[in-house]
Image (cartoon, rainbow, N blue to C red):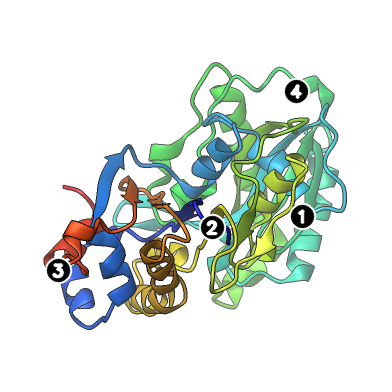
Amino acid sequence: MSAHTSVLCAIPGLIWPASGLSEALSDLALPGLSALLAHADVRHAAPCSLDAWLAAQFGLANNAPFAAIRLAGEEDEAPATDTLWVCADPVGLRFARQHLLLDGPAALDLQADEMTSLFDDLNKTFADVGKFLFTSLHHGYIALDAAHADKLAVTLAPLCDVEDRPVAQFQPQGAQAAWWSHLANELQVFCHNHPVNKAREARGAASLNALWLWGAGCSPSRLTPPAARLAAHRVDSQPLLSGLVRLAQTTIEAFEPTPAADWILLDALHAPARQRDMARWSQALQMLDTAVFMPLSQQLRTRKITRLTLVSPGDTTLASFDIGPTPRWQIWRRHASKDRLLAALGSPA
């Protein structure tokens, strides 16, 4: 990495969204993160999902066409810019404590033959809506018929915002909300009664009884990358990011232990934080401290990088930690105390 470089490192899930953080930190040794946060300027902004944050990084507004972008990251070619796409991801709806909650695709243990059967029949029954396809066990899409090109006056909640939460809080909003609600209800009835779901219920598997519609829009023609050099952990597992990179006509590299990029996405904490899995979150945080935070702290001390910003999009806050080289007169302040770590990594009141 060249000298005098500013680095942005996005770590969704760095802010623990629930209670119990004090106990977890008491069992962790985090010298790298402690060194960074000892002299960080901390800012909190309104909560922001990872998907929305990534879109904004590439110059897109909140109601971005996530379906077309994610599809661009999964297919060999980018979608045509004149086709209206919407995510139609397989989900399970269940009642718990008088609320209808949503289980995301990863919680359903779906099989390829189930998806093939369901989506083949969707195309037969809803041919007037558009073409249904799935690209993986977790991702489905609809290429809407041209007759529905006027249905974009709507806000549809991203799936990542809805998982494990009351569905009633995330209904379509806007001038075309009624049309989307009607379509979602029809698809729910179809999925609930489909032989695939009946067979799953008969063997005690989680229900596949709905499709979550979100991210509607046409593919943007060209996006602007947030930096010259991009890197991410597990690039292949981030189709939305891959789609953004493709549409920006740039490249992204796999993250190395010693960062060599200006913009880095590390998502090891994202799923554990969303699932409130403290054990996995703690393990991942310890790994990041050794592989990421320690090298970054060393590069700040030796002036190989001049400024580091850690950003954590999340459902309780959008936290930013702005860190420069340690001032020589503050050389005594090498590590953050446990109390400072607790305040920094906990959700704001």
Question: Could you say where residue 175 lies in the image, as x and y percent from the top left?
Answer: 55, 16
| Residue 343 screen position, x and y as percent | 17, 58
Question: Residue under circle 4?
Answer: 148
The mark closer to the camera, 3 or 1, is 3
Which mark sits nearer the N-terminus, 4 or 2? 4
Q: Does 178 sit left or right of 133 as displayed?
A: left
Query: How far is disc 3 from disc 4 in space, using C-alphas?
Result: 57 Å
Q: Looking at numbered disc 4 in the image, what kind of residue is underneath it?
A: His
Work out whether residue 217 or residue 241 is closer to the camera in this orientation and state it.
241
- Circles 3, 4 touching at the beta carbon (< 8 Å): no
Q: Any mark on residue 28, and which?
A: none
The numbered mark, 3 or 1, whose residue comes first in the sequence reads: 1
- Contact flag, marks 4 and 1 (Cβ < 8 Å): no
Tell me the crowding category of disc 4: few under 14, some 14 to 19, or many 20 or more residues within 10 angstroms, Cα based: few
Residue at x 54% of width, y 74% of height: 257
Measure the C-alpha gap from mark 2 to mark 3.
26 Å
Residue 74 - label: 1
Which residue was labeled with disc 3? 337
Circle 3 residues within 10 Å: few <14, some 14–19, many ≥20: some
Q: Which of the two residues, 180 or 82, is positioned nearer the viewer here?
A: 82
Real-space CA distance between mark 3 and mark 1, rounded to the nearest whole angstrom: 44 Å
Quadrant of the drawing holding the N terminus: bottom right
Q: Amino acid at mark 3?
A: Ser
Q: Residues within 10 Å of mark 1 (few under 14, many from 20)?
A: many
- Amino acid type at mark 1: Glu
Residue 43 visible at all: yes
